[in-house]
């Protein structure tokens, strides 16, 4: 047992960092007080610390990039697993099981995953997983706010049945004339 010189609370030796030069082999302040002091110091010096790190990264670009590549190489799978668990409650094994069930590719367009894994698509209201999508299909659904009515209107638009064509509108001639003028064409 040891008494912390900062908070004055008597705690077990495990609550103190080791220090070889100290009489009992442990620091005089407990771990909690030490961490609180460090946190306070960082909050007071945050901008300077960040600037110093950025400066080091800029002057040691090759070393920093090599470190980042190695970190992603060794920690990549664990980082992916953590992301899937935190965000969707899935393990990598669950993800790997889902992929062949939908044909091995994007559930909408069928594109196979390449360098970038397929995204886990989910209902934003219920959180229910709908499938795995390529970046393009996932972004498209997001742009349409997962609204089936907007998607149906987009389909009609692409099928050319929703609105009259531009050349059928009164303004169509004006648009054509302006586009010809911009292009420098007289057809």
Image (spheres, rainbow, N blue to C red):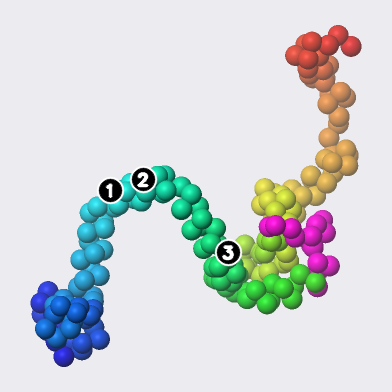
Q: Residues within 10 Å of mark 1 (few under 14, many from 20)?
A: few
Residue occupying image coordinates x 23% and y 80%: 18
Q: Would residue 129 be found to the left or right of residue 21 on screen?
A: right
Mark 2 vs mark 1, CA separation in Å: 10 Å
Indicate whether 97 appears above or below 48.
Answer: below
The span from disc 1 to disc 3 (Cα, nearest Å) is: 30 Å
Q: Is residue 39 above or below residue 89?
A: above
**Relative image position of residue 147 (x, y in whole percent):** 71, 53
- Between disc 2 and disc 1, whose residue precedes? 1
Who's the residue at 78% across and 15% down the image?
Answer: 183
Whether residue 154 is visible to the viewer of this picture, yes or no, is yes
Question: Vertically, is 169 above or below 81?
Answer: above
Magenta segment range? 101-116
Mark 1 highlights which residue? 48
Residue neighbourhood size for the residue with mark 2, other residues' Cα within 10 Å, grouped as few (<14), some (14–19), many (≥20): few
Q: In the rendered structure, does residue 107 fall within the stretch colored magenta?
A: yes
Q: Are marks 1 and 3 in contact (CB under 8 Å)?
A: no
Image location (x, y in percent) of residue 8: 10, 80
List the residue tagged with mark 2.
Answer: 55
Tell me: 23 left or right of 53: left
**Magenta-colored stretch includes residue 187:** no
Asked if the residue under mark 1 is in contact with the one under mark 2, i.e. CB atoms within 8 Å, the reply is: no
Q: Quadrant of residue 110?
A: bottom right
Q: For residue 73, which numbered disc appears in the image?
A: 3
CA gap between label 2 and label 3 equals: 25 Å
Q: Is residue 141 visible?
A: no
- Label 1, secondary structure: give it: helix
Mark sitting on residue 4: none
- Residue 163 sits above or below residue 87 on the image: above
Which quadrant would the C terminus be assigned to in this image?
A: top right
Q: Quadrant of residue 119?
A: bottom right
Q: Position of residue 40 (x, y in %)?
A: 22, 61
């Amino acid at each position: 047992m040891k008494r912390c010189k900062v908070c004055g609370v008597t705690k077990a030796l495990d609550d103190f960092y080791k220090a070889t030069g100290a009489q009992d082999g442990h620091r005089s302040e407990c771990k909690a007080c030490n961490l609180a002091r460090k946190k306070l110091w960082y909050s007071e010096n945050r901008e300077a610390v960040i600037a110093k790190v950025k400066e080091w990264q800029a002057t040691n670009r090759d070393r920093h990039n090599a470190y980042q590549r190695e970190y992603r190489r060794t920690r990549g799978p664990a980082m992916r697993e953590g992301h899937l668990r935190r965000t969707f409650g899935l393990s990598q094994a669950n993800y790997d099981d889902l992929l062949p069930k939908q044909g091995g590719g994007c559930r909408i367009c069928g594109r196979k995953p390449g360098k970038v894994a397929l995204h886990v698509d989910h209902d934003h209201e219920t959180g229910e997983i709908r499938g795995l999508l390529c970046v393009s299909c996932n972004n498209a659904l997001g742009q349409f706010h997962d609204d089936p009515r907007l998607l149906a209107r987009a389909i009609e638009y692409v099928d050319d049945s929703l609105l009259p064509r531009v050349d059928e509108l009164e303004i169509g001639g004006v648009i054509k004339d302006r586009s010809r003028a911009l292009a420098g064409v007289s057809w």
